[in-house]
Image (cartoon, coloured by chain):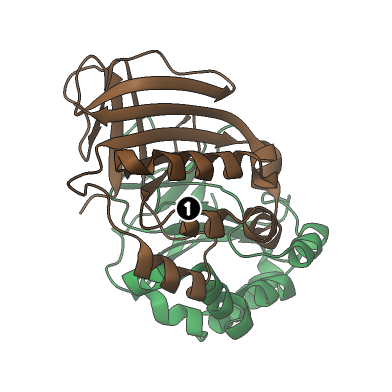
Chain colours: A brown, B green
Amino acid sequence: MSRTFYFSGGEVGSFRVVDTLSLRGESLPSVSHLDVTSSAPTTAPTFCLWGVTSNDRYVTTAEKTELVSRQIPLGRPNTTHGAFIPIKKNAEWWALPQDARRRIFEEDSRHIALGMRALPAVSRRLHHCRDLGVDAPFDFLTWFDFEPQDVQVFDDLLGALRASKEWDYVEREVELRVERA
Amino acid sequence: MSRTFYFSGGEVGSFRVVDTLSLRGESLPSVSHLDVTSSAPTTAPTFCLWGVTSNDRYVTTAEKTELVSRQIPLGRPNTTHGAFIPIKKNAEWWALPQDARRRIFEEDSRHIALGMRALPAVSRRLHHCRDLGVDAPFDFLTWFDFEPQDVQVFDDLLGALRASKEWDYVEREVELRVERA
């Protein structure tokens, strides 16, 4: 089973783009639809970003046990709302040893704890782009879905993460809010 | 500067293959030469494996400080001997949380400490293949060089690593010993 997923922005797709926010650095071309597929698009979209799901980089055994017990996969019947958030971190982040990154990620920024607080409302899949062996414009693509009633839970999660020390290392971030087409 | 490196086995290349050992799983096609380049080969070699250098996955700040102070980049004038070792780990390894992998990697297997003991004699560059977004046959490609007088230091390093708990998770490993052509 392929670990690669494609996010194609254009005039067609399973999701309607309702908002595009440029948080930091260059934005993405404005599009009306987003398609999310596990094989490469056969037509030429306005943009196509891709990444691979991979092993956990920071979670401990205890954290993983709790995450697994609480999280629900993407695509529940009523999760009509979603967000696609590509992020690039700076060179300083990538030069840090593992323990320093973990400390900033969780002990300082509570990234895992904040995500846990949004469970099971907000489902999420993380895709890595940094080691694709090509010049990828982002390091991570995160794809979320949730029910309309949980928009505030999601907004609170984003607000808390963006106020964290970890985000000092983010040099590019774009957010596409979507709804099922 | 590209982080991608190509290891091409065939009838030409900067290194003569003096031995090919199949340690675990399927071997590689037998070749007389290995070429190591930072751009894709323009002719068709017998095999071409590629990977990307990336951020540290396990080393702590203290370990990194010591490594950086002792290691010497590849390509010293007299490091005429080398080895190319592609490795694939099993699904069980990749499903482990970060703390469990770190524990096996260093606290149980002393991977970093063993590598440190071989410094500065053995220079090394690690390339990652698992997140290339294509079906790569290996997870890691490691490229070493050393002077002829340090062959035993290198052999001892390999012997110790292969006897470690970490190697219980290795499902494929091939070793090409090379000398500068």
Q: Which residue appears at 49% of the width and 32% of the height?
A: A138
What percent of the width, then of the height, locates residue B116? 72, 71
* Relative depth, front residue between B125 and B102: B102
Q: Which residue appears at 58% of the width and 85% of the height?
A: B108
Determine which quarter of the picture holds residue A84.
top left
Q: Is residue B112 visible?
A: yes
Asked whether, in this view, residue B163 is left or right of residue B130, the answer is right
> Callout 1, which amino acid?
His
Q: Secondary structure at mark 1?
A: strand
What percent of the width, then of the height, locates residue B24? 34, 75
Asked whether, in this view, residue A51 is left or right of residue B25, the answer is right
Q: Is residue B13 visible?
A: no
Q: Which residue appears at 20% of the width and 54% of the height?
A: A1
Q: Residues within 10 Å of mark 1 (few under 14, many from 20)?
A: many
* Relative depth, front residue between A51 and B12: A51
* Relative depth, front residue between A135 and B152: A135
What percent of the width, then of the height, locates residue A106? 62, 59
Q: Which residue is denoted by mark 1 in the rendering?
A: B128
What percent of the width, then of the height, locates residue A130? 49, 41
- Mark 1 — on which chain does it sit? B
